[in-house]
Amino acid sequence: MVYILDYLIASRHGYERRKRNEQHVHGGPIVFHDQNTVTPCILIPIFLRSGPAGNDDDYPMRNSSASAVSPAFFDPSRMSGEGSPMTMSPWNQTTASPFTKWSQYEENLPRNGLIGSLVREEGHIYSLAASGDLLYTGSDSKNIRVWKNMKEFTGFKSNSGLVKAIIISGDKIFTGHQDGKIRVWKTSPKTPSVHKRAGTLPTLKDIFKSSIKPSNYVEVRRHRTALWIKHSDAVSCLSLTNDKSYLYSASWDRTIKVWRISDSKCLESIRAHEDAVNSVVCGLEGFVFTGSADGTVKVWRRETQGKVTKHAAVQTLLKQECAVTALALAENTSGSAVYCGSSDGLVNFWEREKEFKHGGDLKGHKLAVLCIATAGNLVFSGSADKTICVWRRDKLIHTCLSVLTGHSGPVKCLAVEEDKEASSKEDQRWVVYSGSLDKSVKVWSVSELAPDLNQMAMMQQQQMVMDDSFPSESDGSFSSTSRTSQARRY
């Protein structure tokens, strides 16, 4: 099935098979879901403290329906179509009823939920990029769609198949493609709906100049050479530096390339990994992070001396058998942290002190993590299990605030923008876009507020006392074991 093909990034031996079997789907109407029909998500937090990554012996336990470390229980049959995360609560273990013993407290919690869904039956969604009120979507249909206020605003065709990455820098839009090329598009304030092709990276001029010198050719596969400035396989990810001066491209050809935005020059090509590079992300102070199907996450530092830009590997954060599928960087008042999604369903993270130290892993998915995004104090992880976990970060403690469900296929990409209209001093809110291999994009409203954990714990204790005070329905006797049996389920 097409769904399986791309998220088997997990297999380092499978990326050639994945490329050969990619399919193209075209045609179909646009369908919009009205905001008034949305079922809101009711929040009950899952207390997930980050713990050290386990070894291979605990792999079955980490991927079972109930984690030994986490009290969260996963039963997809209990999730509703648009998915309230309430059924994922460790306190709601036996029923999916919306009336729980926490319902009085739920009324005071911020609402997370679905705003709407964008559907155009023309291809599986592989990439997203948000800028202000505009959303760009890339698919395997060769088309790039632009949406505004939940409606299709405009679109343009790339003529190059699957669009694997989109990134926006001012009036320029960069798109990474299956054919190994990076295409550049420009808009004008006078005609924002018109996107004109501005060129390709590398430029034809640079290709011609480089092709003259034999030393510019490198071996990319056995008995095959290519110019070092060109990607010889699919472009999997794009990332911009904070000052928008440099663009980084990651590829299945095992390299990352560094491009100067001002003149479209390729400054450096780095053989970064021993297998396909699935993700690249730029951080402060010249740090660059790469994740690969070879199971490693590496840290690079950029050094610029005059016109020469060089990168040196400074640290390897992770070595594992499972493929690294996604990376994201969080930089806020809690400090800097790097998040890594893997094919085993875990999200590992590292906090930076003098160097990056492993802080633990987040266990929230049953299948491969395919995408990660960060905003404010929140971390979002999308998975092949069709769900999105919303995590709140407070130093080394991560709390799962919501599990957003509703997609019928793997969640392949995420984009987050601040919800300026709904946000307040007391409640920072975000608009989250999720693209899926079910050919749809869903739009969610998510709050950064976390419930008071102490108050929730007190309510839990009070409820357990009440449970001990009422006769059992079976024999009319008072229960003396209810507290113990309930504790076993956490």
Image (cartoon, helix red, strand yellow):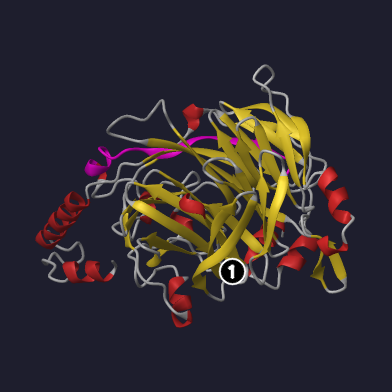
Q: Amino acid at mark 1?
A: Ala
Direction front: furthest residue: 306
Q: For this view, does 182 lie left or right of residue 247?
A: right
Count how many numbered circles sit on residues in the image.
1
Q: Is residue 263 visible?
A: yes
**Range of residues picked out in magenta:** 104-123
- Residue 39 position within the rendered picture, expressed as x and y whole percent measured from the top left: 44, 37
Q: Nearer the viewer, residue 323 or 382?
A: 323
Residue in the picture at 12% in, 62% down: 468
- Residue that protrudes farthest toward the right in the picture: 212
| Residue found 41% across the figure and 49% down from its top | 331
The residue that disc 1 covers is 323
Query: Which quadrant of the view contains residue 362?
Result: bottom left
| Image location of residue 439, percent across then percent down | 66, 44
Quarter placement of the C terminus: bottom left
| Residue found at x 11% / y 67% | 477
Q: Is residue 219 above or below residue 81?
A: below
